[in-house]
Image (cartoon, helix red, strand yellow):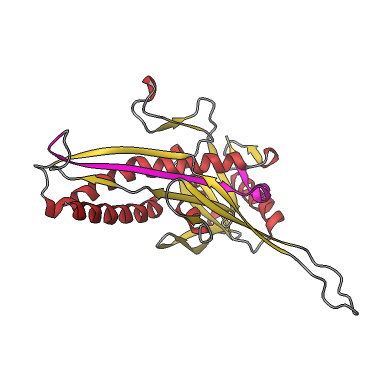
Amino acid sequence: MALNTLEYAALLQTKLDQKAVAEMTSGWMDGNTGDVIYKGGNKVKIPTLSTSGLKDYDRDNGYPEGSVNLTYEEMTMEMDRSTSFLIDAMDVDETNFVASATNVAAEFQSSSVVPEIDAYRYSKVAAYAEADNVTTYTPDPKTLFEVLKNDIAAVQDIVGENTPLVCSINTKVKSQLEQLDKFNKNIEVTSFTQGTLNTKVKAIDNCRLISVPSARMWDSYTFRDGKAEDEKEGGFVKGTTAKLMNWIILPQSIVIAVTKQDNMKIIDPATYQKADAWFIAYRRYHDVWVKANKREQIRVSRQ
């Protein structure tokens, strides 16, 4: 039985990791982890590559020497969240346990985990933005299209027009935008990859528009610890002074996000002593970072 439960845990963990990236509106951020080193737990190593600049060519001595410096910074995933489930042994037998456990965990992940990770990521990325790049704007059909284009242009003024941008936009604001004739006359439809999912999204000026439910677009949240009297429900709520964001615009390549499920624990009914049930322990580490030299490229609009 021990071997079987280990196999169940590995299978379920792989499925849930893939499903999490596919369902998150911020799942595209996970695409920038190719060089990130992860060996388990809550630690990752993020590389920083720097080179010296151009120098004058010397006709006597030839090419001047340059330098390449690759360093790794160890980062800690601050979000360490968990829960557990019991599935009564009478409800399932061993042969269909994986299907039943996947259904339970997948529903929990869709309704609780994915919204929380999205909310955390957007609020933290917004917090990285420099103060001068955070503006206050109440969406108005008369100016909405122009304000959005100006914010896109502000980022392109730093990174260039050929750098792919992502605009994570409040779903309600996007709905207002889509009712404008001048928006519909200027949109493009382009390919967008998130995890294993390839899809088509609307874009303006080489900036992809990714719709985000408004509940995930506050600039601060309280993530309940499940211990304090008023936090026993767990989950998350918007911060007491939170402001609703209209959009966050930034180059697709500058955000590094990691979400990892720690070794899932599954205990069969014969072993679990507190109940005649399967016990599933779910623990997920996650975090998001923007390197200091890239933070000027973030533009945030909030109400």
Question: Image point 50% across, 63% down: which residue?
Answer: 189
Is 222 above or below relative to 163? above
- 99 left or right of 222 in image: left
Question: Image point 57% across, 46% down: which residue?
Answer: 248
- 30 left or right of 55 in image: left
Q: Nearer the viewer, residue 177 or 77?
A: 77
Image-quadrant location for residue 86: top left
- 29 left or right of 227 in image: right
- Residue 180 visible, this orientation: no
First to last magenta residue range: 275-300
Is 234 above or below relative to 89? above
What is the x, y in percent for residue 46? 56, 53
What is the x, y in percent for residue 137? 61, 37
Question: Image point 64% across, 39% down: which residue?
Answer: 134
Magenta stretch, main secondary structure, is strand
What is the x, y in percent for residue 5? 21, 51
Taking the magenta stretch, the answer to whether it contains residue 278 is yes
Quarter of the C terminus within the rendering: top right
Q: Nearer the viewer, residue 155 or 119?
A: 119
Taking the magenta stretch, the answer to whether it contains residue 48 is no
Question: Image point 41% across, 29% down: which residue?
Answer: 224
